[in-house]
Amino acid sequence: MIENMNLNKILVLGATGRIGSELVVKLRKRYGNDDVIVGWHDNTPTELLSSGPSENVDVTDKVSLQSVFERHKVEEVYNLASVSSDLRERRPDIAWNVHIGGLVNVLELAKSKKTKIFWPSSNSVFESSEVASRAPQEIFIRGDHTLEDITLISYNVLANFYGNTPNAAYCHEFFWLDKKTAFNSNSSNDQISGLSIPPPVTFYGVVKIIGELVAAYYWNQGIDIRSLRYSPMISSKTPISRGFTGFIADMFSHARQENEFISSLHPDTVIHLTAMEDGIFATEKLMGLSYSEIKRFISYNLVGVIATLKELEEEIKKNYPTFRIAYNTNSKQKQLWPSIVDTSVASTDLGFIPRYDLKTITKSMLLI
C-alpha cells in the first residue's frame, strides 16, 4: 500500500550503499517511487534504484545539498553517507569531512526546513583497547550536551586517538572545537572525561561518538534527528566486499562452496550481527514515531545476534557439515565488541525484538 506524502519528498543520502539500496526499495514500496530520492555520489544507481528520482549530491557540499532540499521539497532525510572501511582509517580527514561535516550540513539545513533526519551511529563506539563485557545504552556521563561538553569530549577522544597529543588538525574548522581551550592533557587510554565507556580505537568509532554528541546538541536546539547504533548488518541481497561485514559474507560464501575459510581471529571472538530486514524494520519504526513521542535524543543500541565465531561455524555446519574455519588461535583479540548489549530501551520504545536469530540469519546467508 502506497502512503500519501503530501508532495513532500524523502531523500536517502548514500542510497547506493549496502543499507541504502535496500532501504530505498522498502521506502518506495511504501511511499511510491516518485517520493523517494536516491542521493548518490561515487557509485551510480543500479537499474533497480533508477526507477525513481535520483541526485548526484555530495554531503560535504552544503550548496548542492541545499539545492536538492529546495528543488524536491525534502521533508525527511536518511543520512547514510559514509566512507568505506578501508579508506576511513587511512584517510581520517576524508572520513571526518563526510561523517561529521556532512552531518552538520544536513542538520544546519534542517533548521529552517523543519526536516526529520535519520542518522546511524554504530556499535564501533564500543571498540576499545580493552573491550568492556557489557555495552550500556548511555555512553555519556552528562546528558545536557552543551557546546562545552561537545568541545571537551570531542577533542579528548580525538587527542586519545592521535596518541594523546593535541593534533586533531582536521577538525578545528568546525565551530565547537577550540584547541586553545579544549585539550585536556589529563585524558588517558582508560577513560575520557564525560564518557562512561573507554574511548574507541578506530576512527569510525571516533566519528560516531562525536556524531552522537553533535546530534544531541542539535536535538536540544529543536531539530528532529533520530538514530540507531547499527551493529554489522548483513544480507544475501547486497554484495559485501569490505570491513567486518565483508569478512562474514566471505565466510558464508566459502561455506556455500564447501571451501575452508581462513580466519585471522580466535574462535572465541565475540561478534555482533543484525539481519538487514531487522535493521531496516527498526529504522522505519523509529522514523514512524511522532516528534512528541520522543522525549530526548538517543542513539538506540541495536543488535540481532551476539555469538562467537565458533558458534557461527557450528551453525553453518548444520547445513554444510564439511565446512571448517582455520582460526588464528594465537590471536589475543577475543572480543571485537561486548558480549552483552543493553537493548532494553530499543525494546521498550520501538518494540524491537529481532526476528532473525543465529539459526535464521545463517540460513538466510546460505540462501537456504
Image (cartoon, rainbow, N blue to C red):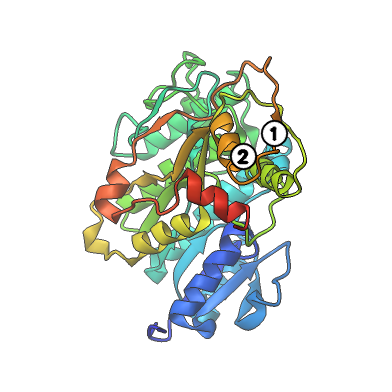
Q: In which quadrant will I find the C terminus?
A: bottom right
In this rendering, the count of numbered labels is: 2
Give residue 46's position: percent from left, percent from top: 70, 72
Q: Residue at x 51, y 77 (%)?
A: 28
Q: Is residue 50 visible?
A: yes
Residue at x 58% of width, y 18% of height? 164
Snapshot quadrant of residue 329: top right
Q: Disc 2 designates what residue? A: 317
Contact, CB < 8 Å: mark 2 with mark 1?
yes
Tell me if 25 is positioned left or right of 323 in this view.
left
Q: Secondary structure at mark 2?
A: helix
The answer to whether 32 is drawn above or below residue 101 in the figure is below
| Residue 92 numbered mark, or none | none
Q: Residue at x 42, y 49 (%)?
A: 228
145 shown above or below 74: above
State which quadrant residue 290 falls in: bottom left
